[in-house]
Amino acid sequence: MTGSTTSGGSTPAKTVAVTGASSGIGEATARRLAADGHRVLLGARRTDRLERITAEINESGGRAAYRRLDVTDAADTRAFVDAALGAHGHLDALVNNAGLMPLSPLEALRTDDWDRMIDVNVRGVLHGIAAALPAMRAQGSGHIVNIASVGAYEVSPTAAVYCATKFAVRAISEGLRQESAGTVRVTLVSPGVTESELADTIADPVAREAMKTYRAVALPASAIADAIAFAIAQPPEVDVNEIVVRPAARARAA
């Protein structure tokens, strides 16, 4: 299977694992990569959604499988990567997409929300790297795509902790890139406001109402999936390091 090509015939078909694949950017990415001819393994906690998405991909001629995944569990993340390795013998790319965004002012002291964001947004990415990196180094190639946010570049009210987690993902990605030159490619994709369920995790009423206005202009998740597909499709000698995607109608950096 390593030598096969995508449906377009120009890019070798790859095995790609996608976390947070039950909705939003993760779902759109899995669908786009499968449409491009890649083999995709979808991971998330909501297996009912994964089952439906996987079935729809396969029914449309793609190649997809799924596995329940909790990225906050290092052992579960290793098992997720091992499932891709066991099925195909190699893992060409891992998309670390799972994330949470329960915004609130710091003075609200929603420490449980802070802990959840750190666990999913930071530890989840590290668990993905820890699971995939040894196999990629052993096979002599690989690609890790980390999904951050425009919040990795600036901070806004109610988003201090969320932005801190995305600053961390940006730093981790750059460190991994420097340490992996010539073996594992590293791409950081930072979406601006995008249609997703992230806003549904906002419990703070002030932040939730502010987000409704903020998200009036939003990108479709497919736009971010296109950026991820672009990075993955590049030839081995090309390493696309950072992609920032914002709505054209939004003037502010975020």
Image (cartoon, grey):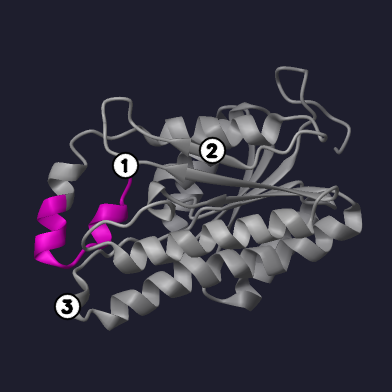
Q: Which residue is mark 3?
A: 107
Q: Residue 55: which numbered mark, if any? A: none
Disc 2 element: strand
Camera sees residue 89: yes
Figure check: 106 above or below 242: below
Q: What is the three-letter code of the residue carrying label 2?
A: Ile
Q: Which residue is mark 2?
A: 243
Of 12 and 47, the residue lying toward us: 12
Which badge, 1 or 3, comes first in the chain's sequence?
3
Camera sees residue 62: no
Q: What is the three-letter code of the residue carrying label 1?
A: Val
Quadrant location of the N terminus in the rendered image: top right
Mark 1 or 2: in front is 2
Q: Residues within 10 Å of mark 2 (few under 14, many from 20)?
A: some
| Residue 200 image offset from top left, x and y in percent | 24, 56
Residue at the spot x=75%, y=38% of the render? 14
| Residue 212 image offset from top left, x and y in percent | 15, 47
Separation of disc 1 and disc 3 at Cα?
24 Å
Q: Which residue is mark 1?
A: 193
- Residue 121 part of the magenta segment: no
Which badge, 2 or 3, comes first in the chain's sequence?
3
Residue range highlighted in magenta: 196-210
Of 65 and 173, the residue lying toward us: 173
| Residue 12 image offset from top left, x and y in percent | 80, 29
Disc 1 element: loop
